[in-house]
Image: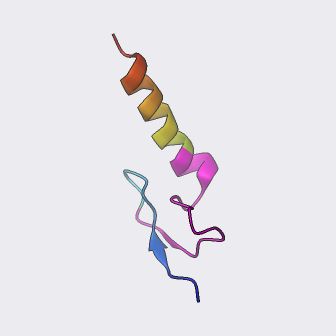
């Protein structure tokens, strides 16, 4: 049985049922993209 997870997005409060055990965000195109963009800017910020 799959576990309900909390989204790892910074401002997200949603719960979701992951289709894949490695899934971390409720909607990859929203919360996941924000996390990836934040990591990118943290790496490339002078």
Report the residue at 37% width, 50% height from top.
10
Direction from residue 12 to residue 25 in the image, left or right = right
Report the residue at 50% width, 37% height from top.
36
Q: Residue furthest front?
A: 21
Residue 38 percent coordinates (x, y): 43, 33
Residues drawn in magenta: 13-32
Residue 1 percent coordinates (x, y): 59, 89
Report the residue at 58% width, 76% height from top.
17
Residue 15 percent coordinates (x, y): 48, 72
Question: Relative to residue 30, is residue 5 depicted above or below?
Answer: below
Question: Relative to residue 18, is residue 34 depicted above or below?
Answer: above
Q: Is residue 10 magenta?
A: no
Report the residue at 56% width, 41% height from top.
33
Q: Residue furthest bottom?
A: 1
Name the chief secondary structure element in magenta.
Answer: loop
Direction from residue 1 to residue 5 in the image, left or right = left
Residue 20, image quadrant: bottom right
Viewer-side residue, 19 vs 26: 19
Viewer-side residue, 24 vs 34: 24
Q: How many marks?
A: 0
Q: Is residue 21 magenta?
A: yes
Question: Relative to residue 19, is residue 10 depicted above or below?
Answer: above
- How is the rendered protein coloured? rainbow
Residue 21 percent coordinates (x, y): 58, 69
């Amino acid at each position: 049985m799959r576990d309900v997870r909390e989204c790892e997005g910074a401002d997200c409060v949603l719960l979701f049922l992951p289709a894949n055990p490695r899934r971390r965000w409720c909607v990859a195109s929203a919360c996941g993209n924000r996390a990836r963009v934040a990591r990118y800017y943290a790496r490339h910020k002078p």
